[in-house]
Amino acid sequence: MTQREMHIETKVIHAGEPEPRVGGAVTLPIFQSSTFEYTGQDNYDALKYIRMNNTPNHIALHQKLSALENAEAGLVTASGMAAITTTFLALLSPGDHFLAQDCLYGGTFDFINSDFRPLGVTFDFIDGNSAGTWEKHLKPNTRAIYVETITNPLMGVADLKKVVAFARAHGLISMIDNTFASPINFRPAEWEFDLSLHSCTKYLNGHSDIVAGAVVGRAALIRKIAHKLIHLGGTLDPHACFLLHRGLKTLGVRMKQQNASALEIARFLSAHSAVETVNYPGLETYKGYPVARELLDGFSGMLSFEIKGDVATADRFIANTRLPVSAPSLGGVETLITRPAITSHSGMSAAERSAAGISDRLIRLSVGLEATEDLVEDFDQALHRL
């Protein structure tokens, strides 16, 4: 049975595992060695060294991640932002221009808005669901287009098929942040995206105990990004590699439960009289539902919503809950709740958040693995006590 024939639930366990097993160990050991014996490598990038991202722990992850998305190659990094920034810096040069979706993770938005201009790279933000408007932003020096599978924090789903078609028609590199969906719900290479990026801190690891990132996609592009990563030094530590490798093996069962639980909670919230809006691509009433249903195998464990009232009302609701942890980040086994205006998107100005449609009272929820019934009961009592 080839890797392509295996179901993804099998791939998370078996893809990329060393053959034969190291010393017979069922679990890949941690290779906590900064340097390795020279064995005749004829180029700098092939030397075995932690910073080269090519220890046995790294290689196993690269192969597993590329297999999960049916892509040519993969690369792990020290954080999700290391994956994003290294990719941009490897593929864009002074004088280049690119297009980016107008609702993005706050760290990505801040990097684009603050760091590119001094480097001589220009950009335009585009509406991911208005393909007819994209061409007017094209320039002779446009090199890439960047979107998110499910946007943070409004859970929008762009017309991703049109993104790829647009990129192909105009010779652009297509890049997508697949963190919220994970390979269980969406595999960008199958839709002909050039590159898929992840904060592995989230669903891929799933246990809120490491920071890591990944880039998956076309081998020629991954080689360029890997070379840039060597120079920038954003390499993942072998112990973090081990934890990510372990966490990936339960991704299938975790993600399916989180998909189902988030959908049930979204339905509960959308029917509650105290809730004004719910953003979840799996709701039939959500504006992006038709596109999401066509593209995604599941709708993720992420949702956001606004309660009737003001920011103080939102804060009271969060304080009233008993099970969720009030904390940033997402994708772990525990449910996390936060207001993006003061955490993930606090680096944006109030005007920038408003332009992106992110209100200060917006609440973002990362649904964990607790019993769905317990979470619904908790949210019900928290709303009742407002």
Image (cartoon, rainbow, N blue to C red):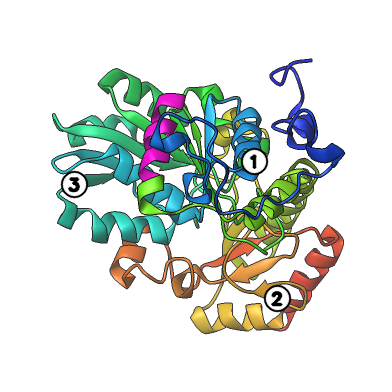
Quarter of the picture holding the N terminus: top right
The reply to whether residue 184 is in sight is yes
Would you place residue 244 above or below residue 8 in this image?
A: below
User: Label 2 amino acid?
Assistant: Leu
- Measured from the top left, where is residue 122 in percent x and y? 18, 46
In depth, the one of 47 and 30 nearer the eye is 47
The amino acid type found where label 3 is placed reads: Val
Name the residue located 43 percent from the left edge and 68 percent from the top edge.
359
Instruction: Give the prevailing secondary structure in the magenta stretch.
Output: helix
Q: Residue at x 46, y 26 (%)?
A: 219
Specify the segment rendered in magenta. Answer: 219-229
| Residue topped by disc 2 | 383
Type of amino acid under label 1: Pro
Please name whichever residue, 293 or 180, is drawn nearer the observer in this view of the structure.
180
The quarter of the image holding the C terminus is: bottom right
In the picture of the structure, the residue carrying the numbered disc 3 is 121
Q: CA distance from mark 3 to mark 1?
A: 36 Å
- Mark before the other along the chain sequence, 3 or 1: 1
Residue 353, label in figure: none
Residue 20 coordinates in the image, percent (x, y): 79, 29
Q: Residue 56 bears which disc, if any?
A: 1
For the point 29% across and 54% down, the residue is 112
Residue drawn 33% across and 36% down?
145
Left or right: residue 341 versus residue 270 is: left
